[in-house]
Every structure is written in C-alpha cells, then in structure tokens.
Image (cartoon, helix red, strand yellow):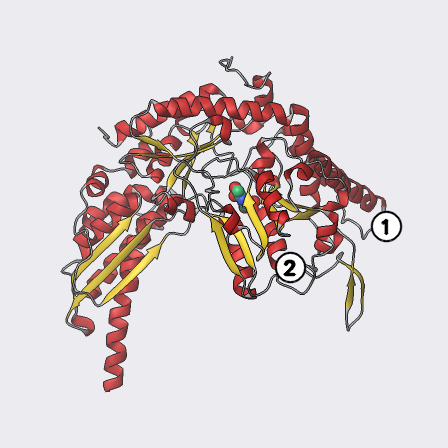
Amino acid sequence: MSANLDAMYQEIILDHYKHPHNAGLREPFEAEVHHVNPTCGDEVTLRVHLDGSGPDATIADVSYDALGCSISQASVSVLTDLLIGKPVKDAMSVHEEFQSLMQGRGKIEPDEDVLEDGIAFAGVAKFPARVKCALLGWMAWKDATSQVVGAGNAAAEEKA
Amino acid sequence: MTRQLPGLLEGLDLIRQDFPILERTMEDGYPLVYLDSANTSQKPQVVIDTMVDHLERHNANVARAVHQLGAESSEAFEEGRTKVAAFIGAPEREEVVFTKNASEALNLVANTLAWKGPLQVGPGDEVLITEMEHHSNIVPWQLLTERTGATLKWFGLTDDGRLDLSNIDELINERTKVVSLTWVSNMLGTINPVQEIAAKAHAVGAVVVVDASQAVPQMPVDVVASGADFLAFTGHKVVGPTGIGVLWGRRDMLEQLPPFLGGGEMIRTVTMEKSTYADIPSRFEAGTPPIVEAVGLGAAVEYLGHVGMENIRAHEEAITRYMLDGLKNVGGVKVLGPADAGDRGGAVSFELDQVHPHDVAQLLDSRGIAVRAGHHCCKPAHKRFGVQASARASSYLYTTPEEIDAFIEGLEYTKKYFRVD
Ligand SMILES: Cc1ncc(COP(=O)(O)O)c(C=O)c1O
C-alpha cells in the first residue's frame, strides 16, 4: 500500500468529496466565472458575493457548481469553508498560502493556523499532475473576486 | 508463462523482451503494467538502437551535404520513407510526406485547402466530419470553415458508439467538398466503415481524409483499398519515436495542394520576387526534417511488419475481448463504445460509478498500472454520452492477459479504497 497515496487521499479530502460544503450556485453575486482544466476537462462555475467595498469588504458567499475528481471537488469545498466570512485581504493571503503549498513540490510545511482543513492537500503537492486539480477552484475564486474588487476600484477612481 | 487465449501472439514472452521499458519496476515494487498505448506506444530495442546508431555514426543534415556523412544520412532518411510506403501499401514512395505528427498532417491538408487551387474550399461548400473525432481532426476543419465561409457538418453517434449513418445521403451531398473521419476511434474504439463512406464521398466529388492514427498501429492498412485520398498517422503510436508523423496522399491529390510551410528544401528556385516549388514530397517538407525520427520510424514499421499486422490485430482483439469480459464482472463499470471486441480497436474507455476517472487512474498508478484519464482529446464525444471524463485502458502487441488481470484487480482495489458499496 502506497504511503504517498494515503498522504494524498486524506480522510478529510474523501469526506469533502462525498459531502461537499456550500455546493450549488446561489444569489446574490457580483461575479461569476467558469474555469476549466484543459488537460483533463475538470470544470467549475463559481460565484462570489462581497459585503461592502474597498479594503474592508468581506466575503459574504462563495457558491459553485463543480465537475471533477475528488481532489478538485474537495478543494473548492474546503475553500468555501475557509474563505466565507473573511475580509478580502485575509482571504487573499490564505489563497497565497494555499497556492505556495500546492506549488511547493511537497517540500513546504503548511501552516495549519492559516489553512485549517486545507493542510490535508499537502500530499497532493507531490503529484504534479494533480496540482492543477487542487488549484482549479482557488484560481476561479481569485479571478471572480479580483473582478469584483477591480470593478469597485474602477468605479471609485471614476468618482475621484 | 502467459495464459493462452485464442488469437494471442505466438512468442509473446519474446516480444515483451524486445521492449526494455516493460521490465521496469514502479514505486512500491509493482511491475509496470502499461495500458496507455493508444496515447503512445512503447519502443522496441531495435528502434532505439537504430536511432542511436544513426546519431553515433551517420549524423548529418540531409539533401544539402556533399560529404559522405551527408550521403549516408540522406540515404537512411529516404529509406525510412520507403519502409513507411511499403508498410501502408502506398503505390509510390513520394506519396509519403513526413510531418511533425498526425495533427500537423491533418492541418497540412485543412490549411492548404483554404488557398487558391483546384481543391479550394469556399463559401457554400460543406466539410463533413464526425462527432467521435480527436480534437486534431476537428479544430483544423473548424479553422478551415471559419476562414473560408464554408459550413462544418458532422455525423452523429448511436448509443452504442457507432457512426449514425441514417442520414448519410443528406450529409454527403453535392455541396460536400471534404469528408474527414477517423478510422478507429481513440476513445470509443469503434472501427468505422471507411471504405463505404469514401465511396459515397467520391460519388459527389468530395476529397476523403482519413485519420488513421489508431488504425495503422493496430491493423493491416492498405491506403489504396481504404478509399482515402489523404491518410494521416503518427510515428509514436506505431512503436516509433515522437516528433514524426505521416501524411500519405494520392500523387494527383498531393499535387493539387498549394504549399503549406515555406522554407528550405521545399523550393525549386527562389528570387526576391517569387519562388517556384519542389515536387512532392519535398514541397511539403520545409526546413530540416525529423531525420533520426524518420530512421527510427522506418525501423518501427519494419518491426511491426515482421510480427505481422494480421497477427497484431488478432492479438488486440483477443486481449480486448478478455478485458471487456473482465470489466463486465466489476460492478459499477460502464464501458463506452461497442461491446464486441470484433468491431473495435484496443482502446477501452469506461466509467466507474462513484469514482472520478482521475482518481481511478491515480489508484491504478499506485499499483504500477498506467491508464489514461480525462477527455482523451474527444470532448464532443464525451459530451454526446453525457460524461465529462472517462478512464481508458489501451493494449498493444506486448499486452498480456495477466496484465489485464492486474488491471481488473486494481479496479476492485480502487472501489474498496473509495468505499464504493
Ligand atoms: C485518433 C487520433 N487522431 C490524432 C491524434 C493526434 O496524434 P498526435 O498528437 O501525435 O498529432 C491521436 C493521438 O493522440 C489520435 O488518437
């Protein structure tokens, strides 16, 4: 039995896969994106709803509809648990932490205080082919959130 | 000792010894079980040695060197062409054009049909493909029709993964300029009635292009009997190297195509104002060609010829039947494509209930079993069957029944791991 395999398919990941949190697309939302992993066809449609604007905005909701493997499904489920309710600023640093963990080829020690359930994905980083699966939902979230924040900034600049 | 099944290659153990990679041990001590040959095939020692020998002893550019090495290299390169021509029954060796891969071969035809010439495709014309094509035989035709104002049409598929030919007389009509289809599907395994469709296409004056990327590796191919005007395949799936593909075209058809890429070797003479072009095949081989790859491809098709393509086809059929029978006994498995091994090639795509194909492939890989997971460059065909992705196990001349047993056991293990009830 492969130790690497068990390191990747953590209990937490299998749980999120079988019972995804915050799944489904909900209203209201300010941005919706559709991301695809072109090599394997995994897809996610993701919506972001922010409360407030500017640097103080918080993530009121992240809703999604995802098609894909256990890793990509579990990862977007964990994302919603981690980011909903956080100020955009903090959410962005969680994103950064998760991304560097995934791109660290298994050599980065994850920070449990920041990533919580997200540390379960540390084992995925050893499988280069699966890193994109784990990042699919996270890239979609960043894209959608940047769109909302960017639109807010543009509007603010116009006023100024 | 391998188990006996009717149709298996004689001396399978010896054939396996020709492929050094098959001796590899993977992580955790599992022997390699390579079931991804529809993606790329493994290489026999003779191909590796022939390429190394060329690089060690005969390396030079072709066609432009006066020295001895240049002559040797040119001869070896052209011998590759001769061997490929013989292997596919091409009436003339000049009808074999070397490209980078099958994708480039298909693009060569689709791209040049946009330009002025006797075969030019224009507004009002129709190009007909099928819903089971590899992206390499879809996108070039989308580009052609978008650029020329022609219309793209396609054959749909039946529920059991065959071409739906019920509306063939509507689809192939006097506006049809090109019919391009795969001989053997890389996803569904289906073997298409290429001859019958080519005859209908020719009756309305259409050009017939056949994507034989999965056919040439697996069964005897006679380009003339196939009815194709152009036929493409790729070197790395016929136990040859990557970096080389083949476009075969009937001489009179190739001669009607305008040049594709411009550059060295494809010209007769060049002035600052204009150029005139070389005869086929050089006209379509701009720049330094894949030399050592052509030498390797020659050795590859010669190797397959020695084993015998009839024998390889019988072997693939026997192994595929054995695999399909094994899959029937794994609860929750759904095979996409024809159920009878007699009607299909050796690529078997399937779904496993409650486990995503990536996870299937990952679990199998942890036991040394290599399969493919994803859309296999056939997104439209997956969509047709309402699946986003599938896992695919594909055999070749070196595959044994014991490897299929390991694969089936691996699936049971996968189900247990993911707690599928
Ligand atoms: C049916 C079919 N057509 C075309 C191709 C493309 O081959 P290549 O990637 O070598 O161009 C493949 C293989 O991937 C194939 O299976």
Residue B299 lies left or right of residue B160; in this view the side is right
B324 relative to A79, above or below: above
User: Residue A68 appears at what percent x and percent y?
Assistant: 31, 46
Residue B238 is at least partly visible in this image:
no
Outermost residue, bottom direction? A160
Label 2 lies in what chain? B
User: Nearest the camera: B372 or B186?
Assistant: B186
User: Nearest the camera: A68 or A120?
Assistant: A68
In the rendered image, the quadrant that contains the C terminus of chain A is bottom left
Amino acid type for the residue under numbered disc 1: Val
Q: Secondary structure at mark 2?
A: helix
Mark 1 is surrounded, within 10 Å at the Cα level, by few (under 14), some (14 to 19) or many (20 or more) other residues, namely: few
A39 relative to B353, above or below: below
User: Residue A63 appears at what percent x and percent y?
Assistant: 20, 57
* Point 51% across, 25% down: residue: B317
Are discs 2 and 1 both within one chain?
yes
In the rendered image, the quadrant that contains the N terminus of chain A is top left
User: Residue A83 appears at what percent x and percent y?
Assistant: 19, 57
Please give the residue where the numbered disc 2 appears in the rendered image.
B112
User: Nearest the camera: B253 or B64?
Assistant: B253
Please give the residue where the numbered disc 1 appears in the rendered image.
B66
The quadrant in which residue B419 appears is top left
User: Residue B159 appears at what percent x and percent y?
Assistant: 38, 38
Amino acid type for the residue under numbered disc 2: Thr
Q: Secondary structure at mark 1?
A: loop
Q: Name the quarter showing ligand 1.
A: top right
